[in-house]
Amino acid sequence: MLSLSAIVLAAGQGKRMKSPLPKVLHQLAGRPLVYYPVRAALESGASEVVVVVGHEGDQVRGFLAQAFGTRVVIAHQAEQRGTGHAALMAMGAVRSTADATLILYGDTPLLEVSDLRALWAVLEGHPKRHSPCSPARWTIPRAMAVSFGTRRGAFRSIREHRDLCNDKERAITEVNPGVYAARLSFLREALQGLRPDNAQKELYLTDVVEAAGRAGGAIALPTDVGECGRHQRSGAAIRCRKPRCTAVSWRASAGRG
C-alpha cells in the first residue's frame, strides 16, 4: 500500500474576491474555504497535509494550526510565480517516506472524500501511471484551463484558454478543476523541469500532467469539482450544510494553470 501525503495550494491573493482577506480564509458554511480541502485530504488517507501559503500567510498559518494542529505542515511561497512553483515550494516539506501525494487547491470546498480515494486507487492500481487527475466537463468561460485527452481516459495536456491555438481547441468542454495525485518520485523530477513557456510567464502545474501524458503515465477520472469564488459561495454553502457535500461544477473566470 502506498504511503500518502497531500499538498494544498493556498498562497494566492484572490483578487477577484475584492477583499483584503486571503481568498482561502473567506467563510463558507461557518468555516474558511481552506478547511474543506485539508479535511478531505486527511479523511481520504493522507497522513499529513503540506499547505503552501503566501499572501497574508501568517493569517492562514494561524487558522490551520488551530484547526488541524501538527497534521498540517506549512511551506512558504514568497513570490507567486505560478502553481507549479507553489508545488515546488512544498517539496521540501513533504516527508521523505511518502510514496505519493494529492495536489489540491485551497479554494475547492466541495471536494468529496470518495473522489480523492478514487484517485488514490487509480494510482495504486496502475504502477506505471505517474499522475491521475480529474477533468470536468463544463461550459467554458474565458480563461479556463482546457483538458486534452482521449476516449479511453489517457491524458495528453492541459492548457490555459489564452494559450489555445484555434477554434477547434476553444470548442473543447472538458476543463481542469485542479485535482491531482502523483507519485512523488516522478513529481519531484517533473517540477524541477518546469519552464515559463506561456502567456503568463509562470510555472504551470498542468505542465507536469502533460509530461506524465507524454510518458504514457497520465489518466483522467471524470468529476464535477470546481473552485469557489465570490459569486459561488452562496450556492456552495447550501450544499455544504447538507449531511454530505455534493460536488458541483462552477462557472469561473480564472483557470487552473
Image: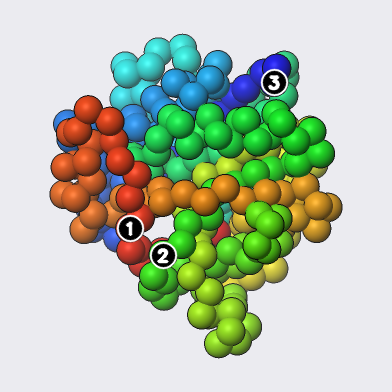
Residue 150 in sight from this viewpoint: yes
Query: Is label 2 in a helix, a strand or a loop?
Result: loop
**Quarter of the image where the N terminus is located:** top right
Nearest the viewer among 177 and 16 is: 177
- The secondary structure type at the circle numbered 1 is loop
For the residue pair 45 and 82, the one nearer the viewer reads as: 45
Residue 150 placement (x, y as % from top left): 68, 63
- The residue beneath circle 2 is 138
Among the two numbered marks 3 and 2 on one chain, the one whose residue lies closer to the N terminus: 3
Please tell me which residue is depicted at 55% across the width and 16% down the height of the picture: 47
Label 3 element class: loop
Residue 167 in percent (x, y) is at 55, 87
Name the kind of residue labelled 1 in the image: Trp
Q: Contact, CB < 8 Å: mark 3 with mark 2?
A: no
| C-alpha distance separating marks 1 and 2 | 8 Å
Residue ID for mark 3: 2
